[in-house]
Every structure is written in C-alpha cells, then in structure tokens.
Amino acid sequence: MKLFHALAVLIIAWCAVIGRSQAVTLEVRAGDSTCIKAELSASFSIPYNTSSSTRTAQFSLPDSATADTGSSSCGTDSSSPWLVAVFGPGHALGLSFSTNGSLYNVANLTLQYNLSDTSVFPGADSSDVVTVVSSSVGIWATVNTTYRCESPTTFRVGGSTVTFSGARLEAYMPQNELSPTESVCMADQASTTAPPTTASTTTTPAPAPTPPGTPERGTYSVNNRNGTVCLLARMGLQLNVSYFSLSQNKTVQELVNLSPNETSVSGSCEASSASLVLTQEQITTLNLTFTLNSTSNKYRLSAITLLANWSDMRGPFQASNTSLDYLRSTLGRSYMCNAEQTLAVVPTFSLNTFRVQVQPFEVTTNQFATAEECQIDQTQMLIPIIVGAALAGLVLIVLIAYLIGRKRSHAGYQTI
Ligand SMILES: *[C@@H]1O[C@H](CO)[C@@H](O)[C@H](O)[C@H]1NC(C)=O
Ligand SMILES: *[C@@H]1O[C@H](CO)[C@@H](O)[C@H](O)[C@H]1NC(C)=O
Ligand SMILES: *[C@@H]1O[C@H](CO)[C@@H](O)[C@H](O)[C@H]1NC(C)=O
Ligand SMILES: *[C@@H]1O[C@H](CO)[C@@H](O)[C@H](O)[C@H]1NC(C)=O
Ligand SMILES: *[C@@H]1O[C@H](CO)[C@@H](O)[C@H](O)[C@H]1NC(C)=O
Ligand SMILES: *[C@@H]1O[C@H](CO)[C@@H](O)[C@H](O)[C@H]1NC(C)=O
Ligand SMILES: *[C@@H]1O[C@H](CO)[C@@H](O)[C@H](O)[C@H]1NC(C)=O
Ligand SMILES: *[C@@H]1O[C@H](CO)[C@@H](O)[C@H](O)[C@H]1NC(C)=O
Ligand SMILES: *[C@@H]1O[C@H](CO)[C@@H](O)[C@H](O)[C@H]1NC(C)=O
Ligand SMILES: *[C@@H]1O[C@H](CO)[C@@H](O)[C@H](O)[C@H]1NC(C)=O
Ligand SMILES: *[C@@H]1O[C@H](CO)[C@@H](O)[C@H](O)[C@H]1NC(C)=O
Ligand SMILES: *[C@@H]1O[C@H](CO)[C@@H](O)[C@H](O)[C@H]1NC(C)=O
C-alpha cells in the first residue's frame, strides 16, 4: 500500500514536470503587417488505440512549434484568418478566427496528429494522420484588444482535449504588437484583485455565509411551440461560485441553492438540442443545454451557462462552457442519478446536482421514459448486495464449520 502511494506521488510529480510547457510565440503575417499573434502554453491529451487497448498520449506544444506560412492566413473576403502551428512530424494546432466587427472569437480549434510518431504514440495500431475539429470554444475578446487568460482552460476537440494556459492572443490586429488593452477571460476575473475603488463607505464585512444545506428538488418542464412538454427535469441544484465580494473585499466561495418556488422556467427544444433555462429572482440565470448525437442516439449535457448579478458582486458574473459531457444517456430514455454529482464548468463555477432525473428529448405524455441510472448509483446499489452476499457466505461457513464440528465430536464419543 505504501509502495503504491509512493508510486502514485512519483507519477503525479512526473506528469507535472512533463506537463509544464513553455509559452510559445506564434505570428501570422501578410506582407509587413502582423494580423494574428499568440503567446501561449498548450498541452494535449489524445486517446489512441494500440493493438490491445486504448491509451492516452499527453504532451505539450514544444518550443519548436512555428506558425506554418503555407496554411496560416490573414483571411480574405471568403476565408477566415487561420493560425496553424506545426510541430514534430506532421502534428498541427489550428485556430480559426471570426469577427462581427465589435468582437472577435476563436471559431474553432483544429488538431492534427500523426500516429506514426512513435515517440508520442508508442504502439499505435494505425499510422494515420488524424484531424479533428472543435466547435466554438468560447474565446471572445473585443476587437483591438488582446485576449488574456492565465488560468488553464480546457477545450474538447473531437475525442481529445487541448488545454491553454498563460494565453495572450489577438487577431485582426491594428498594429504589429499585441494591443495593450486586454479582454480578460472569465476564469481570471474572479482571482484578480480589486481595482482601486473610489467608494469609501465603511461597510462591516458580511459574516461568512452558512452552508445552505441540500437544495430542494424542483420539477421543471419546457414546452415546444405546440404546447406539448418536450423537456422534463426533476432535480436539486446548487451553484458553487467564486467571485469578488465587495463587502468582504476579497474573493469568496459561495454555495447558492436554487429554490424551485422562486425559479421561473423557460427554454427551447430543437431536433438535436434542447435548453432548460432557470431564472431565480431575475438575478441568477442558469442555462443547461443538451445535445443529441443522432448517429449514436446518445444525448448529453453539453453546455452550461451561468449569469449572476448578485448585489455583493463587482459586476455581473458570467461563466460558460460549451464543450461539456455530463448526464449521458440514450434517446428514448431518461437519465437518473440519485447520488450527488459535481459538474465542473469553469474554475470559478461548478454545479452540484442532487437526485437528478432528466429527459431532454422524445418526451411523450408528460412523463419520464425508463431511466438509465448513472454509474455511481449502480455501484452504490451493488455495495449492500456485496455486503449481503459476504454475510450470507460467512453464515454458511460458520454453519458448515459447526456441523462438521458436531459430527466430529459425535464420532469421538462413539469410539470411546
Ligand atoms: C479504438 O477502437 C475502438 C474499437 O475499434 C473504436 O470504437 C474507437 O473509436 C477507437 N478509438 C480511437 C481513439 O481510435
Ligand atoms: C508522420 O510521421 C512519419 C514518421 O515520423 C513520417 O514519415 C511522415 O512523413 C509523417 N507524416 C506527415 C504527414 O508529416
Ligand atoms: C457582436 O456580437 C456581440 C455578442 O453576440 C453583440 O453584443 C454585438 O452587438 C455584435 N456586434 C455587431 C456589430 O454585430
Ligand atoms: C472553422 O471556422 C471558420 C470560421 O468560422 C470556418 O470558415 C471553417 O469552415 C470552420 N472549420 C470547420 C472545420 O468547421
Ligand atoms: C481598431 O483600430 C483600428 C486602427 O486603430 C481602427 O481603424 C478601428 O476602427 C478600430 N476598431 C474598433 C472596433 O475599435
Ligand atoms: C406540432 O404538432 C404536429 C402535429 O402533432 C407535429 O407534426 C409537429 O412536429 C409538432 N411541432 C413541434 C415543434 O413539435
Ligand atoms: C466549491 O468549489 C470549490 C472550488 O472548486 C471546492 O473547493 C469546494 O469543495 C466546492 N464546494 C462544494 C460544496 O461543492
Ligand atoms: C481591500 O483590500 C486591499 C488589500 O487586500 C486593501 O489595500 C484595500 O484598502 C481594501 N479596500 C477596502 C475598501 O477595504
Ligand atoms: C420558497 O421556499 C422557501 C423554503 O422552502 C421559503 O423560505 C421561501 O420563503 C419560499 N419563497 C417563496 C417566494 O414562496
Ligand atoms: C442557452 O444556451 C444555448 C447553447 O449555448 C443557446 O443556444 C441558447 O440560446 C441559450 N438560451 C438562452 C435563453 O440564453
Ligand atoms: C456521434 O457519435 C458517433 C459515434 O459514437 C461519433 O463518431 C461522432 O463523432 C459523434 N458526433 C458528434 C457530433 O459528437
Ligand atoms: C445588475 O444589477 C445592478 C443593480 O441591481 C443593475 O443596475 C444592473 O443593471 C444589473 N446588470 C445586469 C447586466 O443585469
């Protein structure tokens, strides 16, 4: 056990060393002017198959990565700006940008990896060059400002993930250097210190909020345009938000329960996506979006957005992650989980769920279809069965031992 512990610590330490990546600077130019510049560290986690199993390759964007002049571009009327960083034998990371004039964003991430590279993918059963593309990743900034995000942020690209940290980047650049004005990502905002406030009111620090206990279970439903119920949910929800508290003059971690009686419900149902929007007292809005994969007939909770404008906040708090994979189940079934679950959304916001049953697609006659129970519940149900079986086994052994003992002593008497 001790050896195992030491080994685990060693492996974690080793991963930390390997995983720590250097910031790489990448630049795309057209003529003399720079249109995209990015300084960032990136690490990758890519599952691949060997002849006998599935492994995950973990590596970082090396210092030697460069912007590929052939495929990168500043964009034309018909194509969008694209930064393509190439490294190693045929690996690449692409960031495609788009803008609406006032904001720009990373429209998608492209990851290309060469399974023939045995130093990264030892034992791969294929030698293909694989390309995967993400959907929108939620990197937004105001035009003429630099996007900055020190916090590690993970994006799903196909089955793989890319984690950026210490990122500073800009597209549609007005000059050749990163703009001095920054658009700071949400994840960083909670941890930065307060700007010098001019308010000099001496507020007594609010007492630390008492934990709110288990949230009440609410029943929520969304109707489609026909007025029939298309999404059903029954669950208790608790927000775990870290934000800068004005009254306490520091970042606080607060747990807030959604009270079903104070929550209004809206949402929408489309063929392959359905949203449940819960609004509590007009100051907290939680948007849960489910996506259906019509190839596999599986659905999942793919996006969570929280908007909170609490009185003690410096400004409205907004957090969003659109590449999630929670509450997975099969079309025609509902998802159920009685155990408490924590759904991590961004570093400053997670959602705790209690006694969930949800069905975002194919609801008929206002009722939940047969439930698919989560793994934790199944394991928890197994425990009493295993304990029971073990007890039964023990009783049996004692009984047999007793019977044998009785027979022996019986035989003993006869020989005398
Ligand atoms: C690994 O192989 C299995 C079975 O052939 C396949 O379903 C899965 O998609 C493969 N995974 C990867 C990462 O290629
Ligand atoms: C993939 O890697 C192999 C071995 O390192 C190399 O021969 C091949 O050219 C690479 N493919 C691409 C597209 O770069
Ligand atoms: C760009 O998009 C943002 C967010 O969707 C919106 O607030 C803004 O008005 C848009 N600007 C223009 C010029 O369309
Ligand atoms: C990535 O986004 C750009 C800009 O919106 C778009 O032109 C391109 O087609 C997208 N690529 C993929 C593979 O979706
Ligand atoms: C960005 O800066 C350029 C050059 O300084 C200017 O022409 C343009 O109007 C600015 N755009 C916005 C949206 O502020
Ligand atoms: C509305 O009802 C009609 C007939 O019952 C159905 O064909 C149609 O798909 C429904 N529309 C929606 C948005 O569910
Ligand atoms: C709330 O989030 C923080 C930071 O992620 C974590 O340390 C804490 O355990 C969470 N609390 C609950 C009750 O989930
Ligand atoms: C808030 O805290 C900072 C340092 O922690 C201190 O410099 C500042 O004066 C405090 N502001 C108020 C209004 O108490
Ligand atoms: C909602 O219920 C909670 C307790 O369950 C209660 O304290 C609160 O007053 C109720 N609010 C409304 C608006 O009914
Ligand atoms: C909820 O989120 C989904 C996906 O991010 C979005 O399409 C939808 O418009 C959002 N709904 C509201 C009311 O904000
Ligand atoms: C849908 O599921 C199939 C099979 O599991 C998978 O190959 C495909 O990538 C999924 N599509 C999306 C959009 O996630
Ligand atoms: C947030 O709340 C404040 C005060 O209640 C209000 O003035 C402000 O307009 C709200 N902001 C948003 C985005 O709702």
Image: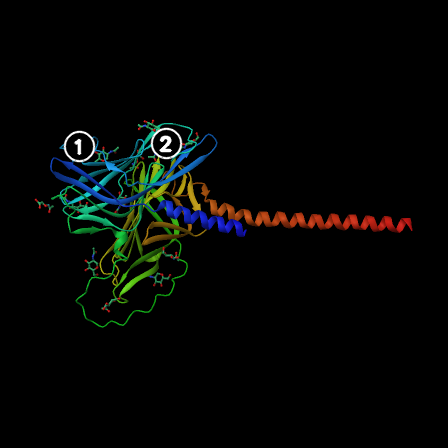
Q: Position of residue 325 (x, y in %)?
A: 37, 42
Q: Earlier in the sequence, mark 1 or mark 2?
A: 1
Comparing 333 with 320, the one in front is: 320
- Label 1 CB, ligand 4: below 8 Å? yes
Label 1 Cα crowd, 10 Å radius (few <14 / some 14-19 / many 20+): few
What residue sits 45% from the left and 42% below the top?
A: 371
Q: Mark 2 falls on what kind of element?
A: loop
Ligand 2 sits in quadrant: top left
Where 263 sits versus 33, above or below?
below
- Residue 280 lies, in percent from the top left, at 29, 56
Q: Is residue 158 visible?
A: yes
The structure residue drawn at horizontal position 44% and vertical position 35%, both measured from the top left corner, is 54
Question: 318 or 140: which is nearer to us?
Answer: 140
The numbered mark at residue 117 is: 2
Nearest the camera: 300 or 282? 300
Mark 2: amino acid:
Asp
Marks 1, 2: nearer the viewer: 2
**What kind of element bears circle 1?**
loop
**Residue behind mark 1:** 79
